[in-house]
Image: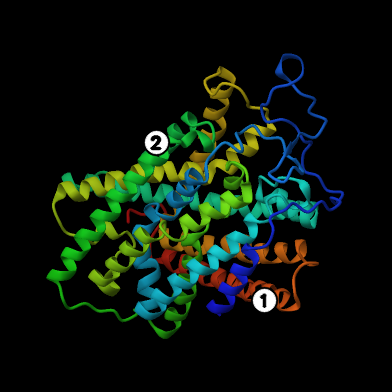
Amino acid sequence: MLAVLYNNLVGEVEEETQVLLEKPPDFHELPMASNGGGGGRGGEVDSSAPRKVLDEDHLAIEVPETAHQISSDSWFQVGFVLTTGINSAYVLGYSGAIMVPLGWVFGVVGLIAATAISLYANSLIAKLHEFGGKRHIRYRDLAGYIYGKKAYSLTWGLQYVNLFMINTGFIILAGQALKAVIVLFNDDNVMKLPYCIAIAGFVCALFAIGIPHLSALRIWLGFSTFFSLVYIIAAFVLSLRDGIKTPKRDYSIPGTTTSKIFTTIGAAANLVFAFNTGMLPEIQATVRKPVVGNMMKALYFQFTVGVLPMYAVTFMGYWAYGSSTSSYLLNSVNGPVWIKAAANITSFLQTVIALHIFASPMYEYVDTKFGIKGSALAFKNLSFRITVRGGYLVVNTLVAALLPFLGDFMSLTGAISTFPLTFILANHMYLVAKRNKLTSIQKLWHWINVCFFGFMSVAAAIAALRLIAVDSKTYHVFADL
């Protein structure tokens, strides 16, 4: 299967990225307008007319209206945005959420297969970015252009749920990291997890208010990489140290036969959750031209160099602790207090930055809808961000504190949104868009992907809901885990 996938990937990546000048369908989401460019009286443009720019092949490409910056970042910066997502503090949970339910053989094979399949699926989406002579800077725009208005709404709903749940998980992670720091110095159980989650949500809101859009992260991506390296290296080294001291470990998959089936399916959802954002067109919107070529470079960076730290800490954590690995690896490690404190603090800080990336599509939507442009420090813009972004993160924080079951959130997110957005839609949209260029074998390949991942999505959703139901019986709401 991997050989077939590789051949398809190589063959399709080498296709021309020339824009197809097909007649667009009747559906259009927004009027085309400048996103802050000059021209006209007072630097304004006529928002009723399409804004057209020339791509690398001198073909007119329509650029949708947006309040955020587009085409301003190098492929390397975009690669770091993608790598920030893949090496977020979520990696500290993969030893327990992926390796423990799957074991060594299926865990290792599953991670490698998920890497290859995710690169392939993301490349399909990336190559449709300028399909039909228009830049599709939002996932819902692309789906709406290919399928129609109903698909636009459905895709937006799926994506919103996907990103909301990812961000809820980030706040849970930040709360866990903050509590771990407090426990290191004062284990009186006064600061419970819900309080730490509330503090984490407040800090995330402050950061969201201060950073107006995705491209404005810039130097923060450097900090994010540094923070990631600190907690990954600390977790790796301390796990190695513990593993050497404790040679006997149990790697058997825990649970009854029935529970093993459900946890294995849930782990499969965690596999795809680990590698995919569900917002690739929004990230690709920020890359400079040629947008397809540069995005492919960013994806290759993400799925080669970018995955190595995640692999290292995931495998090392499972090797050191076996089936007893915690859902948050830093809770399992032993070592100097200052190292554990530094790892947890950097985990907390990196989570704040990563959450902003995954919340950016919602921010872009409301900023564009309400015309929030110009200086980020203007009173109107600042007060709008305080109200809207602060309110959004209040809801995120409340859900995180109410149901702080991190592994369950990863499984459910992968099942109900990551599978459909990244694998089912990607293959079917590419099939529809390129139907006149694909061979019968290629069409069959895409249909197999659509059917297989459709089945996996349903099965993983059932497994994730069962896990949440079981955990809800074990723990009460606002649990102090």
The residue at the point 43 percent across, 32 percent down is: 206
Q: Name the disc covering residue 25, or none.
A: none
Q: Residue furthest front?
A: 57
Disc 1 marks which amino acid? Answer: Trp
Would you say 459 lies left or right of 145 here? left
Task: Please tell me which of labels 1 and 2 falls first in the chain.
Answer: 2
Q: Which residue is mark 2?
A: 203
- Coloring applied to the structure: rainbow
From what the image shows, is residue 426 above or below residue 195? below
Which element carries disc 1, helix, strand or loop?
A: helix
Image location (x, y in percent) of residue 174:
36, 47
Q: Nearer the viewer, residue 427 or 163?
A: 427
Can you tell which of label 1 and label 2 is closer to the viewer? 1
Q: Name the spot of residue 296 as percent of width and height, x first.
A: 56, 55
Q: Residue at x 12, y 69 (%)?
A: 245
Left or right: where 362 falls relative to 252: right
Q: Quadrant of residue 318?
A: bottom left
- Residue 70 occupies which quadrant of the picture? top right
The residue that appears at 66% across and 52% down in the rendered structure is 157
Question: Of residues 123 and 392, which is closer to you in this image?
Answer: 123
User: Which part of the image, by quadrant, shows the N terminus?
Assistant: bottom right
Disc 2 residue type?
Val
Q: Is residue 242 visible?
A: yes
Residue drawn at (71%, 52%) of the image: 142
The residue pinned by badge 1 equals 445
Q: Where's residue 168, x and y in %? A: 47, 50
Q: Marks 1 and 2: CB-CB under 8 Å?
A: no
Rendered position, 18 above or below 115: above
Q: Quadrant of the C terminus?
A: bottom left
| Residue 335 falls in image quadrant | bottom left
Residue 384: x percent and y percent?
Answer: 58, 26
